[in-house]
Amino acid sequence: MTVAGVWIPLRAALTPANAADNEQATDLLADLPADVRFVLGDSHYRDPALHDLAAADGWTLVANRRGPYPHDDGGVEVRRVFHKERSGAIENLNGQFKAIFDVNGPVPTRGETATARWVLGAVLVYQLTLLSRHQLGLDLRTGLKPFLQAA
């Protein structure tokens, strides 16, 4: 889960590939910061429990619909805009993260626990790097890998 123009991960969990996204999202979306207004998700987030969580916490869940196109319901244009933004941002985040930590292939660990520690440790380092660069007034989108290598 990320927020803002730079897409800083707020929470992360490493789960098996067969874990249902909508079930994992409940824990990740609990207690979001008060200024979160929209959460963008793919079709797996179109779940009544997640919509109830959104309504209770005062934010709006925007998730694309399944089924044949074109969709013609009232929210289609809003979802189209949000989905385009989310897709571009999440792909950029994934690409940047994989490039920084050299994980375009297998990670350098074996086993679920060791892999979770490595990946979630990398997410923490990424968060701390963005925080440090923000405090120094540096660009948050470029120069992250050299910045980490110099540390």
Image (cartoon, rainbow, N blue to C red):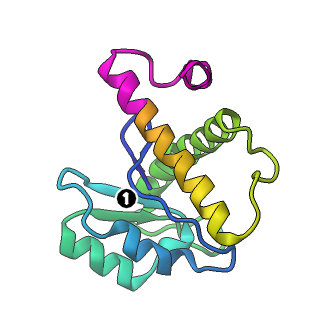
Q: Nearer the viewer, residue 37 or 112?
A: 112
Amino acid at circle 1: Val
Residue 31 as seen in the image, left or right of residue 88: left
Question: What residue does disc 1 label?
Answer: 39
* Residue 142 part of the magenta-drawn span: yes
Q: Residue furthest bottom?
A: 48
Note whether 61 is above or below 78 in the view shown: below
For the image, the number of numbered tags is 1
Q: What secondary structure is marked by label 1?
A: strand
Mark 1, other Cα within 10 Å: few <14 / some 14–19 / many ≥20: some
* Residue 32 occupies quadrant: bottom left
Q: Position of residue 89 (x, y in %)?
A: 53, 41
* Residue 139 part of the magenta-drawn span: yes
Q: Position of residue 27 (x, y in %)?
A: 38, 74
Q: Residue at x 47, y 59 (%)?
A: 12
Span shown in magenta: 130-151
Residue 79 as seen in the image, left or right of residue 142: left
Q: Quadrant of the N terminus?
A: bottom left
Note whether 117 is above or below 93 in the view shown: below
Q: Position of residue 87 (x, y in %)?
A: 57, 48
Q: Residue at x 54, y 64 (%)?
A: 42
Residue 79 as seen in the image, left or right of residue 95: left
Q: Nearer the viewer, residue 136 or 82?
A: 136
Note whether 127 is above or below 140 in the view shown: below
Q: Nearer the viewer, residue 139 or 49?
A: 139
Q: Position of residue 37 (x, y in %)?
A: 25, 54
Q: Residue at x 75, y 52 (%)?
A: 107
